[in-house]
Amino acid sequence: MTEDDARERIAELRRLIERYNHEYYVLDQPSVPDAEYDRCMRELERLESEHPELVTEDSPTRRVGAEPSAAFGEVRHDVPMLSLENCFDEGEMRDFDRRVRERLGQAGPVTYAAEPKLDGLAVSLRYEDGHLVRAGTRGDGRTGEDVTANVRTIDAVPLRLRGEGWPAVLDVRGEVYMPLAGFEALNERARERGEKTFVNPRNAAAGSLRQLDPQVTDRRPLSIFFYGVGRAEGVDLPDSHLEVLARLRDWGLRVCPERRPVEGVNGCLDYHAELAGKRDSLDYDIDGVVFKVDSQALRDELGFVARAPRWAIAYKFPAEEELTRVEDVEFQVGRTGALTPVARLEPVFVGGVTVSNATLHNMDEIERKDVRIGDTVSVRRAGDVIPEVVSVVRERRPADARKVELPERCPVCGSEVIRPEGEAVARCSGGLYCPAQRREAIKHFASRRAMDIDGLGDKLVEQLVDAGLVENLADLYRLEAEAVAELPRMGEKSAHNLVDAIDASRRPTLGRFIFALGIPGVGEENAQALAEHFGDIRALARATRDDFVKDRGVRHVGPKTAESIVGYFDEHGLPDCGDAELAECLESLGIPNVTGRVAEALAERFDGIGALAAAGREALENRREVKVAGIGEVLADNIVRFFAQDHNQEVLEQLLEAVEPQAEASETAASDRLAGKTYVLTGSLERFTRPEARERLEALGARVTGSVSGRTTAVIAGADPGSKVDKAHKLGIEVLDEDDLLALLDGEAG
């Protein structure tokens, strides 16, 4: 690369990095993943080292973060808040350790302090005489934003230091973050209110701390870990960094419990591997590990480079978000016929594995993110989560990028693809005829909450289908143990156990049977409601749309429009339309809220202006009478469409030759003692399976849901309950254990 080429590339990298800094630190809206930012910074550092004559004082390699926002007052850091050098593999970590030992002239291992690298927002807090007087963000490293009022709202921040022996002036550095449970709850509330959600906990923490109204910050679930001291007056702190952290803890300042000393580079590598394994179990986001020389005396000897200390490094985990290119978009067909668009990607290493596919969820999501074939996109993978396309880098869109089109025909069976109005999900209409749906439908049919066929797991279903032994649901009841025993890894005893388990499922409750059919959108609660309403599967199969939802009035005419029409005729009487069509006449009258679409709908229903004028408000206002609890228009259409298909009817009749669904009236009418109460089950129960507990509660009139809300009566928690218990505590909802559940079922509690 010539000097002119280097100068041009350096200028381009500086412009990009300054923009990325502004988006990340000031706007809290990064447009590229951290890995792309790191690549640009590393390339700039390499070019500047190769061409030192091109280094300038305002280069991003010479500064930290970004300029503070003008919306806040400024805080000047007496001791700069520097950044850290990064490394990304074992070789770079060993190079760092070698440089440390060479500069110290030390042959033996160096003791390092190891801590998780939190993905939050760095702050500096000043305590004078033990009282919090000021808090500022990192900003550009020397000047940050004054966020004192907001920091005071964080419960984990002491307004006054505890204990004794603290400095007269203490500048302490920490990382403000949002716990994952709090992040999920915050986004759930935003979704319920129809508000924009946060992309990740780091953005949520930064956006919450940088609110102009501290009352908004106070409502956000922020916390903090302190990781070091910038300045301490009047007290000699220990030489060991870890002992300094212990001192901070004694003064009431929260420090990360995962910190510990490690010996030499091998100790660092072991700690890094250990923490990577624990990463998904932590209640906060981390993106690597920070290793610091533990001795302050040795740190002083090592010193600093332009923007980072020589005695510390951040060993990053494999990026969970990366940039790559969309090579194509294909559609996969699921159990219910839902078509899921999948991006075929230029392979990229992300989240510790090479990713070549990522979900795009549905057409609405594609349209919202404006993903096109050929685009450069940010792809995220965390732990075992399915990779997803997060966003598009619009400025990199090629001229020949192509829009994604929803196929008209199912890519598996060729049946028509249907996307009902107002739905995000498109579906194959092939039902149980479609091979893709057939395989998944059998898995669902056999699952615990459906027919509960013990031993018929996903792998065995795959074997049965691949061997041609099962082509539809009814074939399960024709299986012979001898044929099953010939499958790989299936012995004679296992085969007989499977056939016995299938035989044991021949008398399900009607609700379970309806749920097991896999009708799109029909969950357990809806299946139960259908069972109670129709009482017989054939009656349900014969039902028309009007048996579920019946339209009254005129399409597109709401309460205000109906009132406008009636009011017009009351005031003006019957107008003379002459030879004009009714729709044309109505549009010319200027009746409030009567648009062209409304006029067309009225013209379809009424023979003329006289008939319309004679109609009352009840005849005009569009209302839908729901006849089955929980079954609205879309679900009614799904049910009718499912049973209207010949191949589904054929499979149903074959099933009913082998299966006798049992009416549930006696079960559900047993008692209404818990009517009007709503429970949530979470965790593992010892005396029941969760479906059994659900059935027992519903038999007493209770409603059992999957999510905690303000309408929840109580959460029933078994072992390892997860975040639902945390949410219940936050909402002040009672949490019951399994003994409480038994008492509830026995009538000893309410």
Image (spheres, rainbow, N blue to C red):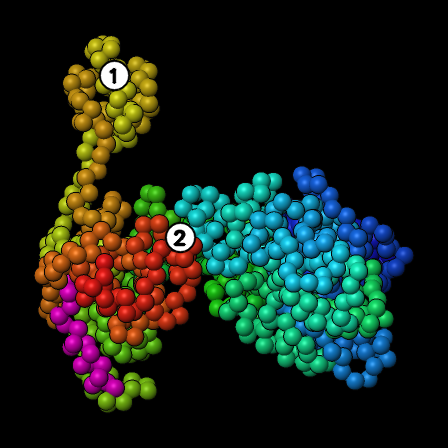
Q: Check disc 2 and give the amino acid type.
A: Leu
Contact, mark 2 vs mark 1 (Cβ under 8 Å): no
When asked about the image quadrant of residue 52, the answer is bottom right
User: Which x, y percent locates residue 98?
Assistant: 79, 78
User: Which x, y percent locates residue 233?
Assistant: 79, 58
User: Would you say residue 509 sits in the magenta stretch?
Assistant: yes
Q: Residue at x 17, y 56 (%)?
A: 673
User: Which x, y percent locates residue 197?
Assistant: 49, 48
User: Is disc 1 surrounded by few (<14), some (14 to 19) or many (20+) residues within 10 Å?
Assistant: some
User: Would you say residue 237 sits in the magenta stretch?
Assistant: no
Task: Determine whether 560 is above or below 384 in the image.
Answer: above
Residue 44 seen in the current view: no
Magenta span dominant secondary structure: helix
Mark 2 lies on residue: 731
Which is in the foreground here, disc 2 or disc 1?
Answer: 2
Q: Check disc 1 and give the amino acid type.
A: Gly
Residue 102 seen in the current view: yes
Q: Which residues are magenta?
A: 494-512
Camera-nearest residue between 125 and 373: 125
Horizontally, residue 376 falls left or right of residue 19, namely: left
Horizontally, residue 335 falls left or right of residue 534, namely: right
Camera-nearest residue between 479 and 721: 721
Secondary structure at numbered mark 1:
helix
**Residue at the outermost bottom position:** 492
Q: Residue at x 11, y 65 (%)?
A: 662
When asked about the image quadrant of residue 605, the answer is top left
User: Which x, y percent locates residue 649?
Assistant: 16, 59
Mark 1 lies on residue: 567
